[in-house]
Image: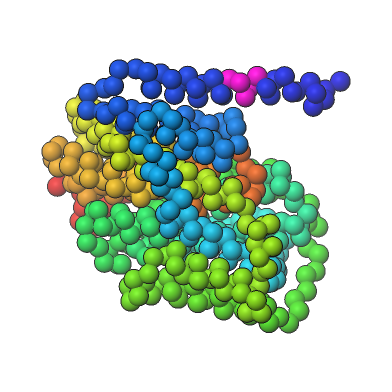
């Protein structure tokens, strides 16, 4: 008779193989002779990062534990001089931005506002999971104009869609639940990058690529990112198509709406205030983490707020904080030791030496972008390293540097390879119990999709609007 006890040895064997792979890669990179141009510290940092990435992707051990272990190894193997640089990520605004938006999401949920929004969604979907799914994909782009941060939208929307799925009695292991949360974690970010005010990716990328107006950025980036959103959403639908075949009576039970309560109005007011502060950053210059933390403080204030401190402590999901902070620390070590620059220059340099036709060069560059993104979960670090190297190589080959730089943005920001790969996704994947191997499978698919769309549609489109690959 088949039982869980009969599965245990196989599961242990699978975990042992994953651990062996991670440790083997770590040992090989750490002990081999340092390549020319790579410092000893950089080699050690690269070895630790590869170990962490494999552990994250395979989930051989807990993702937060793998991150904390990686930070400690940076010190133990001598990649960084002491514990201070190793804890870099814990001092960064992004980690506290995450706390702020998670608190905002909890407040919206606790106030009942998420349930009210979910009721409107259920009425609009009329019991159809397909219509609900299409509504969600459309909202990723539409809500960007009100809530530009993908992390903020995700922190609020995850509670809303949880309410819908709970009302429809959909468990977490159901394909419909997985499709919804995978889309929210992997595709939601695409709506933000299409706008110049859509978060850290367009801000950093536009600064590295050159001066852009809001209209210019939207003209160039809306086509690739909205195309990736549509095609990626369709592929996810195919992956989890069995979950969209609910019974005829699913989700049709009547749902009533009472009068909006004072606590819901307070939650809505805090959301609006936070969004206004984000949109007016040109006037006050505050980092996005500041409005997020203001929102968290308001939500936790007695009488004014929505949550008690004990509710905040119990429900925040602190593993998300450790995942983001440790991934920032590891990425920072790669940058400061020169390992990331060496790796990106080596990859891009190898491509430019062997490729002949412009399209083949760009295709091989896209492969390099994917490899670099895999080991650099911090998108700002990835962009800061890859764009200058790519644009310099493109200029030497007679290609348009701007086109090649924008290609690095499209390929790099269209994928999330594991839960630690982005602020906008980590808490959604963790909350929905979606395993990293499942995330990785879709990420590889999205890499192929983003590259194909870029080469077949976007590059010709950019040529039509004045930016051909070969000037």
Asked whether residue 405 is in view, the answer is yes
Q: Is residue 220 left or right of residue 132?
A: left
Q: Is residue 180 left or right of residue 9?
A: left
* Image label count: 0
Question: Residue 339 appears at what percent x and percent y?
Answer: 30, 34
Quarter of the image that includes the N terminus: top right
Q: Residue at x 30, y 27 (%)?
A: 40
In this picture the colour scheme is: rainbow
Asked whether residue 366 is in view, the answer is no
The foreground one among 198 and 313 is 313
Verify whether residue 148 appears in magenta: no
Please determine whether, in this image, residue 40 is positioned above or below residue 143.
Answer: above
Please determine whether, in this image, residue 258 is positioned above or below residue 353.
Answer: below
Question: Residue 207 appears at what percent x and percent y?
Answer: 26, 57
Q: Residue at x 66, y 79 (%)?
A: 303
Q: Is residue 238 left or right of residue 449?
A: right
Question: Residue 348 appears at what percent x and percent y?
Answer: 25, 33
Q: Residue at x 45, y 63 (%)?
A: 289
The foreground one among 377 and 466 is 377
Please determine whether, in this image, residue 365 is positioned above or below residue 94.
Answer: above
* Overall secondary structure of the magenta section: helix
Residue pushed farthest right?
1
Q: Is residue 380 left or right of residue 276?
A: left
Per the rendered image, the range of residues in magenta is: 13-17
């Amino acid at each position: 008779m088949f039982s869980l006890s009969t599965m245990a040895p196989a599961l242990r064997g699978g975990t042992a193989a994953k651990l062996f792979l991670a440790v083997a890669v770590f040992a090989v990179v750490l002990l081999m002779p340092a390549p020319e141009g790579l410092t000893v510290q950089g080699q050690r940092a690269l070895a630790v990062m590869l170990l962490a990435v494999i552990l994250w992707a395979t989930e051989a051990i807990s993702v937060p534990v793998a991150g904390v272990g990686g930070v400690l190894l940076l010190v133990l193997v001598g990649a960084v001089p002491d514990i201070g640089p190793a804890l870099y990520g814990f001092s960064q605004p992004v980690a506290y931005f995450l706390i702020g938006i998670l608190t905002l999401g909890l407040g919206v949920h606790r106030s009942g506002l998420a349930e009210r929004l979910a009721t409107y969604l259920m009425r609009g979907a009329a019991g159809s999971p397909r219509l609900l799914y299409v509504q969600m994909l459309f909202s990723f782009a539409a809500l960007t104009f009100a809530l530009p941060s993908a992390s903020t939208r995700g922190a609020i929307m995850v509670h809303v869609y949880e309410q819908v799925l709970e009302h429809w009695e959909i468990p977490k292991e159901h394909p419909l639940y997985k499709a919804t949360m995978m889309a929210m974690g992997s595709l939601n970010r695409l709506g933000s990058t299409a706008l110049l005010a859509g978060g850290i990716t367009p801000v950093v990328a536009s600064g590295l690529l050159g001066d852009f107006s809001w209209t210019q950025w939207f003209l160039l980036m809306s086509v690739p990112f909205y195309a990736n959103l549509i095609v990626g959403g369709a592929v996810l639908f195919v992956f989890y198509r069995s979950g969209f075949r609910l019974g005829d009576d699913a989700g049709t039970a009547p749902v009533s709406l009472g009068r909006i309560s004072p606590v819901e109005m307070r939650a809505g007011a805090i959301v609006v205030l936070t969004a206004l502060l984000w949109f007016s950053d040109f006037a006050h210059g505050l980092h996005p983490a500041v409005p997020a933390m203001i929102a968290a403080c308001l939500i936790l204030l007695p009488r004014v707020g929505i949550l008690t401190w004990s509710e905040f402590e119990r429900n925040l999901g602190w593993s998300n904080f450790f995942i983001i902070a440790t991934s920032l620390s590891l990425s920072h070590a790669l940058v400061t030791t020169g390992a990331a620059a060496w790796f990106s220059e080596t990859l891009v340099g190898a491509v430019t030496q062997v490729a002949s036709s412009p399209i083949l060069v760009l295709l091989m560059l896209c492969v390099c972008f994917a490899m670099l993104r895999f080991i650099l979960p911090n998108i700002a670090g990835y962009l800061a390293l890859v764009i200058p190297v790519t644009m310099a190589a493109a200029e030497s080959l007679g290609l348009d540097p701007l086109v090649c730089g924008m290609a690095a943005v499209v390929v790099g920001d269209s994928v999330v390879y594991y839960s630690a790969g982005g602020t906008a996704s980590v808490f959604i994947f963790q909350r929905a119990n979606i395993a990293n191997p499942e995330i990785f499978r879709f990420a590889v698919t999205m890499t192929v999709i983003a590259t194909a769309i870029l080469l077949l549609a976007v590059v010709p489109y950019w040529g039509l609007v004045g930016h051909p690959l070969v000037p």
